[in-house]
Structures are given as C-alpha cells and as structure tokens.
Amino acid sequence: MKDVITAQDVQSIPPGGELSTGLGAIITPWARELAATRGIRIVHAPAPPGAVVVAVGADHGGFPLKEEVKALLTRLGYRFNDLGTYSTEPVDYPDIALAVARAVKSGEAGLGILVDGAGIGSAMAANKVPGVRAAVCVDEAAARNAREHNDANVLALGAKFVDSAGMTAIVETFLTARCTEERHARRVEKIKAIEESYLK
C-alpha cells in the first residue's frame, strides 16, 4: 500500500466507494477534501504485528465505552494494556488517568486512551505527567487536529458525548494520524519547552 494518498488516488475510486490505506499513511488535505466531496470512505488497514501498544483506562462511567474501545483495537490489530477499571463500581478517574499517563511516559505504551463521563477530568489529570499531551476529542476532526497539530499521545473520550460510531471514527483517526509538518513539530517543541521550564 502507498505511504502517501493523493487526490489522484481518490479520483480513481468510484463515488461512494472505499479507499484502503496502510497504517500511518499520509493523506494529503486535498485528498481528504475530495474524498468527503465524493462520499469516499478512507479505511485504514489493520496494524501490523508488533504495532504500538495502547494503554487504555476508564472510570466507572466510561467502563462500557472502554470495552468497545478494546474490541475496536482488537479488530484493528493493536495490542493494548487495560489499566482499569474493570466494572461499573465507582472509582476515581485521576487514579486511572495517572496509570495510563505513566504507561505512556515510561514507553510501556506508545499511546493512551482514557474514557470518563466527559473526558475533561481524565485529560487534566493525565496532563500533569511530564511528556503526556492528552486531548479531549469529540469528533474525527478534533482527533486529527490533536495528532497532526499537537502530537497528542493520549486521547480522552467523554462517554456522555460520544456514541459507538463516533468513538470508532475518533479512535481510528487518532491511531493513524501523525504530526509530520515542520511548523506543527516546531510548535510542539515549544509546548515541551514550557513544561520543562516548570520542572526545574
């Protein structure tokens, strides 16, 4: 499969069809716009064996959606580490967020996914761990922006605001989008510099 998907690739697909891409393929902005205009769905191929491990966690309110996230990761071929919670019994979301953030910080996981009622509290807690850039995403566009512009490494979902279909689109985008443009990478380095200045 191609590493870069262009408008020409999209034009070769009949309207309403699907275009299959490899994991991590770069899709040009014009290709995305053309696909949307022509009703073409861009589908990412399953992750190859040994792909990035995803740390997942949720509080009691996010537990049911977390189980759906795990099923999606399995379908996509991702390995994951479930850091809790394991039921709908009440727990404190900062504890779960800390566990996922630590896994990402240590390199035990390449990315993290957190689920609570709104996603906001988990993101706030995770962002206290140096090196973690957690973003609350409510749709696919936000997920793409979080990864491409901000190099987010933890996704926070709000179970009260995201349904199964929305979760699927958000998670697939978060897993496959990359921060590749120099101007975005430069700005992420400035975020890191701010963090480092407060760690001294």
Image (cartoon, rainbow, N blue to C red):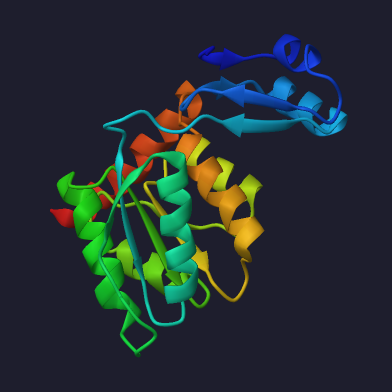
How many labels, in total? 0
Residue at the bottom extreme, as displayed: 90
Image: 148 above or below 88: above
- Residue at image location 36% in from the left, 42% down from the top: 78
Figure check: 61 above or below 184: below
Instruction: Give coordinates of residue 195: x percent, y percent.
Output: 27, 51
Where residue 36 sits in the image (x, y, percent)? 80, 33
Whether 122 is drawn above or below 79: the answer is below
Q: Is residue 36 left or right of residue 179?
A: right
Q: Is any atom of residue 197 visible in this view?
A: no
The relative height of residue 135 versus residue 33 in the rendered view (above or below) is: below
Question: Which one is in front, 169 or 34?
Answer: 169
- In this rendered view, identify the residue nearer to me: 147 or 21: 21
**Residue drawn 41% across the image and 32% down it:** 47
Relative side of 30 to 84, left or right? right
Q: Residue at x 65, y 57 (%)?
A: 165
Query: In the shown orientation, is residue 24 left or right of residue 31?
Result: left
Give the residue displayed 71% in from the left and 12% down from the top: 9
**Does residue 7 appear in this view?**
yes
Residue 1 in the image: x percent, y percent?
A: 52, 13
